[in-house]
Amino acid sequence: MGVAPPRLESSAQSPLRSPVFVRSGTSVADVELPAVPRMALPSQPPLAGASESGTALPLPPANPAPTSGQLDGARRYLGSHPALWMLLAPGLLAVAAVALLRATAVHHGARLAQTSALPSTVATQNAASPRTESSAEELAKLERRPPESLTARELAMLADARSDALRKTAKTLRSKVEENPALAKDPALQTELMRLADDSRTSGDALSAMAVVEAPLGADLLYEVWTRTPVRTDATDLARALVYSTDVRPKASPALSVALDLRVAESCEQYKAILPKALKDGDRRSAQLLAKLNAKRGCGATKREDCYACLREPGDELKATINAVKSRRAPSFTAP
């Protein structure tokens, strides 16, 4: 290979030497590789106080305050065990990252809750503290001005204020009547209830107040609201339902009971059974209901048959009943 081989000694006294391996160009004696440090597995951590070779290591003193010698010893220990801190470092970093994420999530959740609660808080504050434009003083000024001098926004504000005041009046009146139903005997209060019943914004409170008025006045008031107009509204539907309710219907007067029975009768026999009561107690509220029974057509396939043929014998009973109810006046409730 271009290199002279080493000289061999044939003497028996020559010492034995280790063999030398020659590689390309150079010859390097085999040397022993350094021992690889033993890794500490997570499931089998090294025992405290023992070194890798099994020799017991001195334990640190019980004094909690580390000295410079202890710090140097710790550095030397970690330096002699690189696998230990290399194994613990990722775990410590992971724990720190999780703690940081949790702290960030808690902070973000608190901010989000505070932000979501802000609109309701502001709304509550606004409801408790009305704006200057809607204050009573400002509204009073707008009331004194001619309507043609107001803007659309100002007119809307006035309309809302009037509606709120009207609803408040109706609720206050209803509470008073519920606490003392005898108050409704006052004609002025009856007129006020009828006026409020005509307004869709306050009809519910007015009709509810009528329903608790002492008998037979409450049922009479409800019947008046129901029948005094041919137009069907939410107020008339509610008045009809209330007057036929289980706690108001029994309070109706005998005269009103006749009218209520006539309004739900369907067959000729049912009408015939009501005639004696109408003859005795009925008033003008039943006159029109009885008058329609005089019609002798409207039934059958051709609508030319008499629907109330059973009332023709005796023929003067229906006529006498109609004359009797016309002679009796019905309760009158003045409404503007």
Image: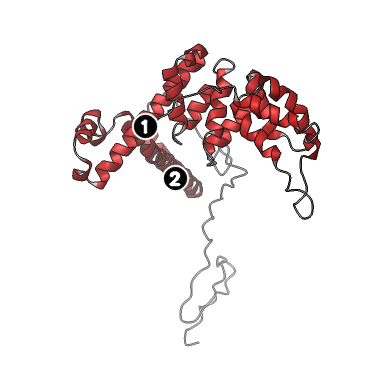
* x then y, percent, for residue 250: 67, 20
- Left or right: where does residue 91 sit relative to residue 287? left
Q: Is residue 171 visible?
A: no
* x then y, percent, for residue 86: 48, 50
User: 231 or 17: nearer the eye?
Assistant: 231
Tell me where residue 265 sits by quadrant. Answer: top right
User: 272 or 202: nearer the eye?
Assistant: 272
User: 64 or 273: nearer the eye?
Assistant: 273
- At x 67%, y 25%, the residue is 258
* x then y, percent, for residue 18: 56, 67
- Left or right: where does residue 40 sit relative to residue 291? left
Disc 1: which residue: 164
* Label whose residue precedes the other's in the sequence (2 or 1): 2
Category of crowding for the residue at label 1, using alpha-carbon neighbours closer than 10 angstroms: few (below 14), some (14–19), many (at least 20): few
In the rendered view, would you say 253 is above or below 58? Answer: above
| Viewport quadrant of the C terminus | top left
Disc 2: which residue: 101
Q: How many marks?
A: 2
* x then y, percent, for residue 1: 50, 87
Secondary element at image label 1:
helix
- At x 53%, y 61%, the residue is 33
Category of crowding for the residue at label 2, using alpha-carbon neighbours closer than 10 angstroms: few (below 14), some (14–19), many (at least 20): few
Q: Amino acid at mark 1?
A: Asp
Q: CA distance from mark 2 to mark 1?
A: 52 Å
Secondary element at image label 2:
helix
Tell me where residue 259 sits by quadrant. Answer: top right
